[in-house]
């Protein structure tokens, strides 16, 4: 165990130096992209906001079922099958089929090549599962059909969330999928997430609907309240225009009224629709509805043909800006709920870094002093291994651009305390061996050999804990598991390559000295 | 070095451990743990007041007027810092926190919200579940590892020592109503690793000595092994405790609970390696034949 080839000495040295370089690169500025890596600081250290959003998919499911009903009606009509009594109930579609066609409908729904109930070969599942009782059919999303629906609404939502966050212009936001109905938003440096939260909390479904003057509307009517809660109005259910046709929106000043408004421009289809509707509706009041609340309901004085319009509604400049931003970024497929929020202010982050570094330095000094007191020269060797261990640990974290959190710093300090264990095990073993062995080289060699399994055992147990934490833990805790786990690997390296190398060199030089350790 | 007769006290310390475990279980069952917002849901606000004249009573009173459910206010580190926790969480309302801040500034002057945590009931339930799974999983993984590495008598000893450490550490948290949050789960897992580590070192030596001395009984043998590894046990726990104490004293308030749990864990872990794990070997009558049989297979 004491023999090292020249090549090995060389590679250990080079490896240690290169990795250590990355540790130092955290504190210097280098122009090269590869060599100027930095450890990323977690939100708890640099300050910022962490938001976990969950999609409320209920409305999407209902919507999808409604459009499916239309599809069914058309499909069966084309096939000359009479179906009736369509109901959507408890997330399923129920309908009746004429007696003679029950088997036909069954096979149409059950066919692997079904047009109306697509079959997904790789998941061995249709989009819908169905039950049949007499003439009645009941269709429900299959598990896979539901996953598909959730995934597509998550994909849409994450895109919209990204646009909205980007428009606000925070630095380096991190937006990630979590499972199939959650979105994680990390906003470094943001200490007041109020505005982002209000932007993400809105679905931003914009519609234009006429205020109904009487109840003769063929599409039916609904009662909506005004945004400011002042009053209610009956509006037609017919949607003149929706936010989908919006091309651009920005806050502007209306010259005549001196009021902040949101001006918008429509795409070609939208402009046409809008022109037609406003031509027919001169004199009527057109309600501008956002997420089921009326923003304002101005009277149409003349047809609006060019595809440009304005929304007024007691805006401040800020609220007009936000509304324009929401309209530009598009509507979310479903409402998002914020189910977890963690915000750390920048000066708490700074305090945490300082406290972390302070305790690292003090912990390090205490351990180093204790090891020197216990082992003198060999304590120095262990301490040298400890220092290179720290450099390797931080260097590897930097190389992989890992995120350092406050518990992560605690993990580094803990590594300092536990790393010496391996050297202690070896040194104690060597002491025992020296009692019965006169040849110190032999004693050192067997000290290393005999302690090896124990050291591996001891480190594997801690590594198991670290790996489980890595997979189960979230955020800051993950940071702890990374430093703890990488710390074990660097500990083994520094003990078996660096400390052993120096020990070997020393022992071979001083083999005739009494009381080596 | 002088031999210390640890084995003379196996019985008395086992009784002591038994009492501590029962007491811990009683506390855990009847008093329960003080779960933080991570596991219970709700809102946590760490705030810094401008003047040191703002005291706990004043802050508690102004929070109580806001209808936020159960409010707890604690001093956090220095006298201008406080941690406020309450049941209500409403992160969907973007003005929720802002309004609290405004109301608070009106009654006690300028405040700075240094940290806000808002955890919904669904998330907290999930976090609790994954925390429990993580601990259970790591215990199972340790069990598996030790089962592969050692004979079953040793595994049983090590696992009992593990449970001993985890239960008593949680018991202490229950007695003093210390907060259990995500970082405590991390601490418990590390305790599990450390305790196992410590036990394995002694067990490795016991097994080695079983091969070396054919005629020494396990009662004596454990004591020899404990003594042979004693200086290592002491040095490693001292360096680990030095590092942990440094976090506890200088690492800021956020890491206090975490480092305290670890300090307790290291102390109990060291103790249990000697006084739980080894007596188990003795009472299971582990002998030279135990490992010989294993090696023949």
Image (cartoon, coloured by chain):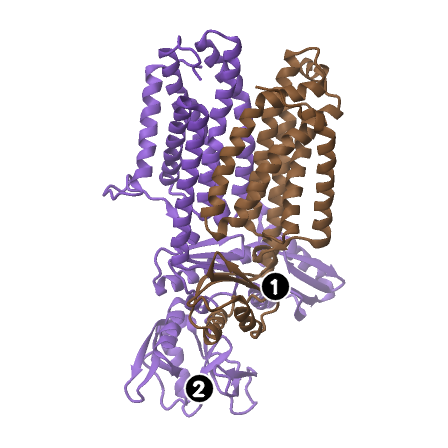
Chain colours: A purple, B brown
Query: In the depicted view, which residue is nearer to us: B156 or B112?
Result: B112
Quadrant (top left/top right/bottom left/bottom right) for the N terminus of chain B: top right
Marks 1 and 2, the one that precedes in the sequence: 1
Query: In the depicted view, which residue is nearer to us: B188 or A188?
Result: B188
Residue B157: give x, y in percent of width and height. Answer: 69, 29
Residue at 46% of width from left, 9% of height from top? A442
**Chain identity of mark 1:** A
Question: Circle 1 is placed at which residue position?
Answer: A79
Residue A275: give x, y in percent of width and height. Answer: 37, 82
Q: Is residue B157 visible?
A: yes
Residue B92: give x, y in percent of width and height. Answer: 52, 67
Residue at 60% of width from left, 48% of height from top? B130
Q: Are marks 1 and 2 on the same chain?
A: yes
Residue at 48% of width from left, 83% of height from top? A228
Q: Residue furthest front?
A: B2
Q: Is residue A178 left or right of residue A250?
A: right
Whether pointer 1 and pointer 2 mark residues with C-beta atoms closer than 8 Å, the reply is no
Question: Circle 2 is placed at which residue position?
Answer: A297
Residue A71's place in the image compared with A279, above or below, is above
Closer to the camera: disc 1 or disc 2?
Answer: 2
Checking the image for residue A437, the label placed there is none
Residue B203: quadrant of the picture: top right
Query: In the depicted view, which residue is nearer to us: A382 or A159?
Result: A382
Q: Is residue A278 left or right of residue A446?
A: left
Quadrant (top left/top right/bottom left/bottom right) for the C terminus of chain B: top right
Q: CA distance from mark 1 to mark 2?
A: 45 Å
Please tell me how crowded label 2 is: few (under 14), some (14-19), or many (20+) other residues with Cα within 10 Å.
many
């Amino acid at each position: 165990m004491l023999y090292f080839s020249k090549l090995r000495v060389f590679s250990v040295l080079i490896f240690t130096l290169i990795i250590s370089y990355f540790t130092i690169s955290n504190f210097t500025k280098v122009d090269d992209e590869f060599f100027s890596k930095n450890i990323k600081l977690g939100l708890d250290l640099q300050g910022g906001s962490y938001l976990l959003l969950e999609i409320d998919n209920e409305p999407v499911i209902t919507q999808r079922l409604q459009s499916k009903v239309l599809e069914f009606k058309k499909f069966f009509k084309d096939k000359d099958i009479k179906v009736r009594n369509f109901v959507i109930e408890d997330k399923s579609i129920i309908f009746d089929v004429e007696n003679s066609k029950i088997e036909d409908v069954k096979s149409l729904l059950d066919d692997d090549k079904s047009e109306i109930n697509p079959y997904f070969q790789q998941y061995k599942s249709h989009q819908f599962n169905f039950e049949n009782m007499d003439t009645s059919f009941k269709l429900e999303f299959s598990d896979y059909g539901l996953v598909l629906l959730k995934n597509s609404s998550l994909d849409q939502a994450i895109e919209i969330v990204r646009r909205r966050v980007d428009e606000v212009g925070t630095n380096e936001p991190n937006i990630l999928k979590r499972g199939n109905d959650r979105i994680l938003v990390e906003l470094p440096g943001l200490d007041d997430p109020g505005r982002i939260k209000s932007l993400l909390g809105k679905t931003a479904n914009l519609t234009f609907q006429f205020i109904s003057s009487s109840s003769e509307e063929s599409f039916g009517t609904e009662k909506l309240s005004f945004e400011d809660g002042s009053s209610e109005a009956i509006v037609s259910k017919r949607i003149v225009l929706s936010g989908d046709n919006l091309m651009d929106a920005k806050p502007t000043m209306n010259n005549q009224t001196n009021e902040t408004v949101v001006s918008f421009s429509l795409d070609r289809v939208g402009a046409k629709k809008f022109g037609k509707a406003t031509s027919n509706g001169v004199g009527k009041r057109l309600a501008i509805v956002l997420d089921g609340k009326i923003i304002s309901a101005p009277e149409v004085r003349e047809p609006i043909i060019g595809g440009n319009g304005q929304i007024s509604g007691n805006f401040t400049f800020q609220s007009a800006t936000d509304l324009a931003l929401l309209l530009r970024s598009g509507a979310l497929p479903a409402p998002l709920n914020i189910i977890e929020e963690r915000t750390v202010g920048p000066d708490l982050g700074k305090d945490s870094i300082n406290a972390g570094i302070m305790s690292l330095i003090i912990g390090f000094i205490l351990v180093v002093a204790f090891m020197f007191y216990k082992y003198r020269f060999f304590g120095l060797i262990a301490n040298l291994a400890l220092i290179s261990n720290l450099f390797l640990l931080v260097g590897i974290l930097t190389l992989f651009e890992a995120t350092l959190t406050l518990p992560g710093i605690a993990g580094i300090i803990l590594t300092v305390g536990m790393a010496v264990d391996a050297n202690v095990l070896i040194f104690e073993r060597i002491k025992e061996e020296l009692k019965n062995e006169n040849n110190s080289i032999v004693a050192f060699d067997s000290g290393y050999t005999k302690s090896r399994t124990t050291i591996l055992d001891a480190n594997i147990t801690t590594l198991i804990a670290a790996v489980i934490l890595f997979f189960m833990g979230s955020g800051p805790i993950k940071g702890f598991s990374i430093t703890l786990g990488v710390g074990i690997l660097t500990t083994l390296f520094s003990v078996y390559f660096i400390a052993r190398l120096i020990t070997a060199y020393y022992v071979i030089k001083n083999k005739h000295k009494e009381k080596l350790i | 070095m002088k031999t210390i007769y640890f084995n003379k006290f196996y019985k008395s310390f086992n009784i002591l451990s038994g009492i501590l475990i029962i007491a811990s279980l009683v506390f855990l069952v009847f008093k329960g743990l003080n779960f933080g917002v991570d596991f219970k849901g709700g809102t946590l606000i760490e705030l810094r007041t401008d003047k040191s004249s703002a005291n706990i009573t004043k802050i508690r009173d102004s929070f109580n007027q806001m209808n936020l459910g159960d409010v707890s206010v604690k001093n956090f580190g220095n006298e201008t810092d406080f941690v406020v926790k309450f049941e209500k969480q409403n992160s969907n309302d973007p003005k929720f926190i802002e309004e609290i801040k405004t109301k608070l500034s009106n009654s006690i002057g300028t405040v700075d919200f240094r940290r806000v945590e808002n955890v919904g009931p669904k998330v907290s339930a999930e976090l609790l579940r994954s925390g429990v799974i993580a601990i259970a999983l790591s215990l199972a993984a340790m069990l598996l590892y030790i089962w592969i590495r050692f004979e079953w008598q040793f595994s049983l000893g090590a696992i009992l020592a593990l449970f001993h450490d985890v239960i008593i550490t949680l018991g202490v948290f229950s007695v003093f109503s210390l907060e259990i949050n995500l970082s405590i789960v991390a601490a418990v897992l590390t305790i599990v690793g450390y305790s196992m580590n410590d036990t394995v070192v002694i067990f490795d030596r016991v097994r080695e000595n079983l091969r070396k001395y054919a005629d020494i009984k396990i009662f004596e043998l454990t004591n020899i092994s404990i003594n042979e590894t004693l200086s290592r046990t002491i040095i490693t726990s001292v360096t680990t405790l030095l590092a942990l104490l440094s976090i506890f004293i200088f690492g800021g308030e956020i890491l206090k609970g975490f480092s305290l749990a670890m300090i307790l864990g290291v102390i109990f872990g060291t103790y249990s390696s000697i006084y739980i794990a080894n007596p188990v070997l003795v009472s299971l009558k582990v002998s030279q034949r135990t490992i010989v049989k294993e090696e023949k297979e």
